[in-house]
Image: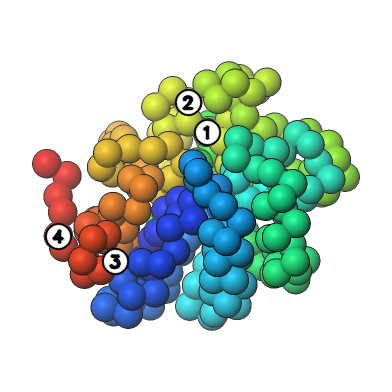
């Protein structure tokens, strides 16, 4: 099983299909943040929304929801608004994406022994309990379902709120907000792959019982998860991935 992982696009969608056409894979997982970038315009946003609409239903693709997507999905909840979100963009996006489209986005996905989310989960979610992987996944499922219902009803939910490191009101950020540098800590026995925090090259946080990787490099790299082993390759520039290493 070979899974391609693509982190925060932020409007940079033109390279995606050419790059994927040059790769062999079984599945593609996008880590969210499809919209918003500095100096973007409504034509950029329309292009991204159209790309996302055609990409979402493809059976070999999983699309996660990121910080910059949440308010466009739940525009009646002001607590979800992120920098770069505007009413003008919202109107353009939701003329193209329907509720059925938005409902295809997920907050997490478990693949080959790794939890993939936009930003990660903190051990605070699990308390002091020594949980099995399945018990942790069950808890994530129930907490994210409650969070989606809360934000749909205009409420704040810690699972989808920012922490102090990102000028939010929570001790640590939630699943779309957790900061890799200042908040992310390995959870024992839980491997994670995340985006959200911009880096020059992918980074890792490894313990004796947990592997964790952050892949947000403005799409200079894509992740590859094959038979439970994570690696990455360079992606942008020539539309042909070239091998990279941790160095």
Q: Which residue is mark 1?
A: 178
- CB within 8 Å, label 1 to label 2: yes
Q: Quadrant of residue 164?
A: top right
Secondary structure, mark 3, is strand
Residue 55 occupies quadrant = bottom right
Query: Which residue position is annotated with label 4?
Result: 243
Which residue is identified by label 3? 226
First of labels 3, 2 by sequence position: 2
Q: Residue at x 14, y 50 (%)?
A: 245
On the image, the x and y values in percent for residue 116 come to 47, 53
Q: Dot 3: within a 10 Å radius of its alpha carbon, few (fewer than 14), some, or many (20 or more) residues? A: some
Q: In front here: 26 or 100?
A: 100
Q: Earlier in the sequence, mark 1 or mark 4?
A: 1
Residue bearing the label numbered 2:
183
Comes first in the chain, label 4 or label 2: 2
Is label 4 or label 2 in front? 4
């Amino acid at each position: 099983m070979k899974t391609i992982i693509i982190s925060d696009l932020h409007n940079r969608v033109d390279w995606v299909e050419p790059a994927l056409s040059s790769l062999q894979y079984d599945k593609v997982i996008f880590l969210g943040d499809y919209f918003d970038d500095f100096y973007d315009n409504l034509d950029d946003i329309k292009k991204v929304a159209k790309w996302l609409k055609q990409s979402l239903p493809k059976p070999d693709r999983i699309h996660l929801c990121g910080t910059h997507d949440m308010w466009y999905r739940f525009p009646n909840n002001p607590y979800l608004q992120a920098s770069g979100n505007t009413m003008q963009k919202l109107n353009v996006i939701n003329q193209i994406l329907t509720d059925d489209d938005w409902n295809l986005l997920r907050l997490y996905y478990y693949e080959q022994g790794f939890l993939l989310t936009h930003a990660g989960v903190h051990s605070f979610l699990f308390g002091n309990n020594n949980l099995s992987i399945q018990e942790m996944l069950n808890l994530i499922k129930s907490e994210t379902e409650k969070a989606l219902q809360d934000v749909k009803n205009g409420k704040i939910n810690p699972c989808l709120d920012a922490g102090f490191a990102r000028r939010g009101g929570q001790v640590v950020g939630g699943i779309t907000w957790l900061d890799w540098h200042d908040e992310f800590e390995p959870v024992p026995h839980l491997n994670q792959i995340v985006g959200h925090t911009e880096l020059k090259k992918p980074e890792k946080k490894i313990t004796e019982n947990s592997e964790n990787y952050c892949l947000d490099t403005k799409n200079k790299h894509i992740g590859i998860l094959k038979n439970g082993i994570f690696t990455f390759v360079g992606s942008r520039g020539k539309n042909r991935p070239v091998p990279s290493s941790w160095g």
